[in-house]
Amino acid sequence: MSKYKCSLLVVDDEPYILATLSALLSDEFEVITSESGAAAQRIFAERPIDLVLSDQKMPKMNGVQLLEWVRQHHPKAIRLLMTGYADLEEAVEAINRGQVYRYLPKPWRTEDLLETLRTAARSFLLERSHEQLLDELREVNDQLKRVNAELEQRVMERTHDLKEANKALEEAIHELEQKNKMLEKLALTDPLTGLSNRRAMDRLAEREIRRRDRYPSPFTLGLVDVDHFKQINARYLLPGGDKVLVDLAKVMRNSLRDIDLMGRIGGEEFLILAPDTGMEGAKVLGERIRSMVETTEFAYKDEIILVRISVGFAVAEEGVQADYESMKHLAAAALSEAKNTGRNRCVFQTMPNLPFEQAG
């Protein structure tokens, strides 16, 4: 069976560009071309489209407007914007609004164009696989309902059939539990770095705060941000930026103790939880992470990339009351100070000395 080719709609008002991209991409994608936003809308009405790559500068309807329309009417389609460097700020704004999956500079580099489209195709296929898995889970649930209904009808008729049905039911429940565990793991994991994502880190932090309420002890929460990461993305594009984040996650994870927890909570922002850690331990931990990053060689396509981080820590000493939101806010203030006072440094803040309420 041949490998599935994602359908790719290329929209550009220059026939030469359409012909060039069609010839370049047809081996890996089912390429459909359109010379305007209105023509692209008609194509969407006629057939499903997996990926859409639109030029920004087009008459009547520009690329951002077209991709916004696609987001509203065909949200499953992966949207990519092609724009000249002069329009880079506009493209970044479109991405930040959640309209565009990636942008590509124009003129493009063939290697970067293919890599970006392949990444987009993998993302689309992963999402489609995820939906198929949900459909399978719903089907298993329907099967469970049918099995239960059959059991109710046959329970008084044949004991042997009941035992066989119970066996099938147990197998179906086991399969459902396994798939639910897999879905839960996917929902709590950052797909790029393999670290815990924001949702998972929120849960872990709240758990540590509750444990500390029962067993008072020091606790440290840290925020880490990559210095000048936009410059890395601008020079090495998103594939290079992603490679830096993956390698950075490994370096920082190797800097932590076994009891410490770390996750990626934003584009280039990481959250660290350090139980049983006061100010002295926080300073050792923060400097170890910062120095290990500073002394590590990061590379992309055989080119060395200098990576530096700024770190902000909020420390709640033993006996000092603290909640998750207050510690995040204090850590964010410390991180901002680290950024504003030179970057590539650690700043530590202590939670105000508000003692725990005594039991009545």
Image: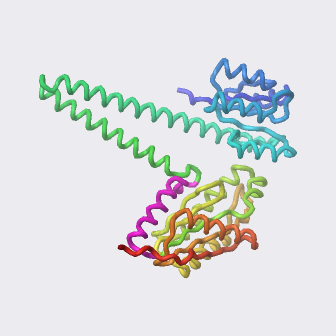
Q: Examine the structure image and report whether residue 202 is included in the region drawn in magenta.
A: yes
Q: Position of residue 314 (x, y in %)?
A: 58, 71
Would residue 177 be seen by someone viewing this image from the given angle?
yes
Q: Is residue 16 above or below residue 320?
A: above
Q: Which is the main secondary structure of the residues drawn in magenta?
A: helix
Name the foreground residue: 296 vs 58. 58
Q: How many marks?
A: 0
Which residue ends up furthest to the bottom in the rendered image?
Answer: 280
Report x, y in % for residue 351.
56, 74
Residue reaching furthest to the front = 360
Residue 49: image location, x then y, percent: 65, 26
What is the quadrant of the C terminus in the image? bottom left
Q: Is residue 106 above or below residue 20?
A: below
* Between 327 and 10, the one nearer to me in the picture: 327
Task: Identify the residue shown where x is 75% and y is 70%.
Answer: 340
Asked whether residue 28 is in view, the answer is no
Q: Could you tell me which residue is drawn at 40 percent across and 42 percent down?
A: 180
Foreground residue among 330 and 162? 330
In the image, the segment drawn in magenta is 193-217
Question: Relative to residue 313, is residue 232 drawn left or right?
Answer: right
Q: Is residue 93 above or below residue 149?
A: below
